[in-house]
Image (spheres, coloured by chain):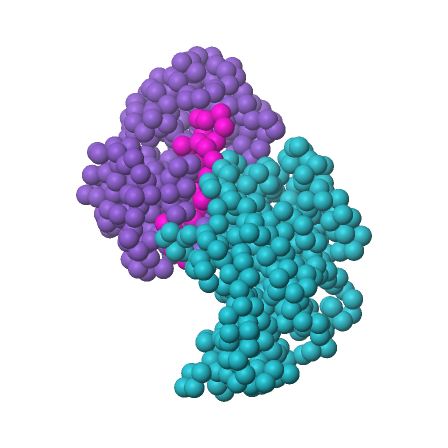
Chain colours: A cyan, B purple
Amino acid sequence: MEKRGAEVSNKQIILRDYVTGFPKESDMLLSSPKVSLKVPRGSSAVLVKNLYLSCDPYMRIRMQKLDPPGYFDSYVPGSPLSGFAVAKVIDSSHEDFKEGDVVWGITTWEEFSLVTEPETLFKIKYTDLPLSYYTGVLGMPGLTAYAGFYEICSPKKGEYVFVSAASGAVGHLVGQFAKLKGCYVVGSAGSNEKVELLKNKFGFDGAFNYREEPDLDAALKRYFPQGIDIYFENVGGATLDAVLLNMRVHGRIAVCGMISQYNLDKPQGVHNLANLVFKRIRMEGFLVFDYYNKNIHRTFEEEVREYLKEGKIEYVEDTAYGLESAPAALVGLFTGRNVGKQVVALEHQ
Amino acid sequence: MEKRGAEVSNKQIILRDYVTGFPKESDMLLSSPKVSLKVPRGSSAVLVKNLYLSCDPYMRIRMQKLDPPGYFDSYVPGSPLSGFAVAKVIDSSHEDFKEGDVVWGITTWEEFSLVTEPETLFKIKYTDLPLSYYTGVLGMPGLTAYAGFYEICSPKKGEYVFVSAASGAVGHLVGQFAKLKGCYVVGSAGSNEKVELLKNKFGFDGAFNYREEPDLDAALKRYFPQGIDIYFENVGGATLDAVLLNMRVHGRIAVCGMISQYNLDKPQGVHNLANLVFKRIRMEGFLVFDYYNKNIHRTFEEEVREYLKEGKIEYVEDTAYGLESAPAALVGLFTGRNVGKQVVALEHQ
């Protein structure tokens, strides 16, 4: 138990400078400033101890200089990264939070974080499932998969669903939601180990290693001779181009992310968009933030908690231990090193 | 009045061979086979005399070898083209049509056409407006503009609307629908004459000549400092890429066509699709055929007829005379020679 008011050292992961190309561990460094374990007087902040940090693809976008700033703000060189985390409240000046509460939301990549806008934190009500799940299946990536699949894809039983980056934090849940809905589901991933996992653990009807497919169009035609009704887009670029050739009439593409493009100076060109017209395809981008605290957020949490407890959804975490391991864990996302949700555990529970 | 049963010569426009690149007049030739002015016994066909032929961008797609065939069928080299037309029934074995009826729908590029599936024809009930309007504002392009704008764009009063190919058959109607809805509307076109027309005749709030804008992104930022809510896409390629940079959050892109891409061996790459995610954009392709004979088709015809009679919508036709002029009229679409709807009148009314 941390002593409230004590001054302790607070390990942090600092961004050295803006990143171009693939991020490297050396783009980040460890620092250990002092922090007072007490919320400053007169504020309405909350001081938390971070338990689990979440590594998410969108963080790469924040590591570069965004000019003009768009939806995301750039991280500030010389300052610590921030991201989703599960954390425990140590001290609070905010009426909605008290010492001992467990929360998830955006904090800083450090041991102790002062959250000055605690309205952005979600209180965790149930602790019967692992707390780390709130960085994944029960948190932002889970709601992303749920809202993206049910709201944007408008799925119907028996439809043909393709998921890219299918073994990732979002993709493997989308595939399982689609199976629960009665769809035929195929996923692509970047290693044979992941392909096995998709087929044998997550119940995908098919899966392939895109690195071993010189012709993605041909691969899709092999798995979808009848075409694709729903594409859950996580990667962009060449995969999207091949998918456009294989979509069915009135198909839907939920654009969740384009991880293959984030490290490129200039994104790849997509050439087959005219298929949107001929096949009357709806292609829609979405961000999970739009679904926070809506009805769907509550339905999601209830439903997915039940699925997990009944074993209807399998969930896989790839856990790194200790703040020192966080840079390597984050960098690994972009080479596809992680299998399942990449988490950094700061303390054993 | 044609004598029923007579054998007459029937001028036709024949496609010589599949087209690559920009179509040329010499890709087509005139032929004059004989035709009997009588529906063959035992059929349920309708024989029509074509009055107006419609030149439409999608015809370029049918001039190439489509392999595999997609939504459109290729025209057959050595056979006449087909397309939308307004025509008069000369002889009918179908119970829904009788001699003297005026219709619009798909016929062949010739003087007299035997329509073997007359269910595809629409009977023209009102003849108080020019019949040629059923190749445009009251026909396929009109319903395209109406369904695309009202159904796909989900417009709201006060929103910022951009239309490309804005002086074309569809574009200039979309702009006027948007003005009637209370939107701010800017269009792009390929000549200063068209830009003047957009501003002075069609009531666009702004218009620019894309050929004189070396930086389309900068042009859009000039006309839409606050961004674009709705983009009505007729051209594709570089324009779409610039638009993606300038869309607002929760924007909508109705993909009606991509005329700039139809003559290219390999379509241009579109690089800025990641904006679909960050800005939660819905981009949706559509085809007018899906709206035929639906409620919206009836609403469209009633509403637009009223608008035309009240002068609330301006409509411009570019008319070529005689079947011999049809190849040049069609080819002119792809160099932007036409101003407004390109029609070929086969006979003075």
Q: As drawn, is B4 to the left or to the right of B93? A: left
> What is the quadrant of residue B13 in the picture?
top left
Rendered residue at 37%/25% (across/down)? B330
Picture coordinates of residue A145 (x, y %)?
A: 62, 60
Q: Where is residue A266 shown, x and y percent of the image?
A: 46, 40
Above or below, A91 against B343 in this view is below
Which stretch appears magenta? B246-272
Q: Is residue B271 magenta?
A: yes
Residue drawn at x 51%, y 35% as measured from the top left: A271
Describe residue A238's horizontal placement relative to residue A131 as left or right.
Answer: left
Residue at coordinates 45% horizontally, 26% vertically from top-left?
A: B264
In the depicted structure, whether residue A111 falls above or below residue A225: below
Magenta-colored stretch includes residue B248: yes
Asked whether residue B276 is in view, the answer is no
Q: B339 or A259: nearer the eye?
A: A259
The answer to which of B108 and A101 lies nearer the viewer is: A101
Q: Is residue B323 above or below residue A27?
A: above
User: What residue is drawn where x is 67% and y is 59%?
Assistant: A341
